Amino acid sequence: MSSDDCNNLDSTNALTGTNKNPRHIAIIMDGNGRWAQKRFLPRAIGHQAGVKAVRKIVEYCAKHEVEVLTLFAFSSENWRRPEEEVSLLMGLFMATLQREINKLDRNNIRLRFIGDRAAFSEKLQAKMAEGEAQTKDNTALTLVIAANYGGRWDMCQAFRTVAKKIAAGELNDQDINEPLINQHLSTADLPEPDLFIRTGGEQRVSNFLLWQLAYTELYFTATLWPDFDQKSLEDAIASFKSRQRRFGHTGEQLLDKSITLK
């Protein structure tokens, strides 16, 4: 079955009232710094607490048939933060990878990274590649870490690749359509997100998976990321399941079993 067939099947299931968990959950993990500040602690402690929250959410998704979990770990805009905090985040990123890769592998979890790796140190890039290689055949859950990622960057790199293929005569401009562009995004081999969650109270997508979120259900919560636990995720999934996903159809069409939904 092709990825397009899978996406069409997912849409039909959603339209006809499936009660399954979302296949793909994408999360902006916001609020680590504010969590620490509320407790008069350094921001670094908040980021460390955020890593503990990640473990709980990964564990839940692996046990409840969520196929893909994408976490926005570091955006292309986060380089604008104070140098000391960026340095701290890079160190925490490396330490977390060194500590968690074997655990992910033992639990049959595949690790993937999306984003522009060129800005990271060679040591960090090597550790990222090592984690992907070690876990590439795992099947319980695909954990995607968006690092130095931006939705606009993702589309730009896809368009550049398509433009090069046109210049080389491999494609012509009439070949450009949505499936073609999708094939050149960093998430080409993954189902599009069904549920997007942002913690911390902000209500925007902040340049995260801009193309991929076109028909994603959005869920915003004031809960700061270190406090976002498995019960919080269950609440978000319950909200997702309560919604009628129409994908452009009318509510009446959903009730007419004679209509083929695409």
Image (spheres, rainbow, N blue to C red):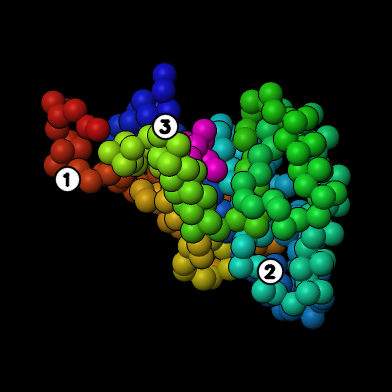
Q: Give percent across and percent down for residue 175.
A: 32, 36
Residue 250, labelled with which disc? 1
Classed neighbour count for the residue bearing mark 2: other residues with Cα under 10 Å, few (<14), some (14–19), many (≥20): some
How many angstroms separate mark 3 from mark 1 (CA)?
40 Å
For the N terminus, the quadrant is top left
Residue 79, labelled with which disc? 2
Classed neighbour count for the residue bearing mark 3: other residues with Cα under 10 Å, few (<14), some (14–19), many (≥20): few
How many angstroms separate mark 2 from mark 3 (CA)?
36 Å
Residue 24, labelled with which disc? none
Assign the magenta stretch its main secondary structure: loop
First in sequence: mark 2 vs mark 3: 2
Q: Amino acid at mark 2?
A: Trp
Looking at the rendering, the stretch of residues picked out in magenta corresponds to 184-196
Q: Give percent across and percent down for residue 255.
A: 17, 36
Q: Is residue 124 magenta?
A: no
Q: Is residue 188 magenta?
A: yes
* Image quadrant assignment for residue 75: bottom right
Q: Amino acid at mark 3?
A: Glu
Q: Which residue is mark 3?
A: 170
Q: Is residue 14 visible?
A: no
Image position of 185 (left or right of 148) = left
Image position of 180 (left or right of 231) = left
Classed neighbour count for the residue bearing mark 1: other residues with Cα under 10 Å, few (<14), some (14–19), many (≥20): few
* Image quadrant assignment for residue 77: bottom right
18 up-or-down from 86: above or below: above
Asked whether the residues under the numbered discs 2 and 1 touch, taking CB atoms below 8 Å apart as contact, a structural biologist would say: no
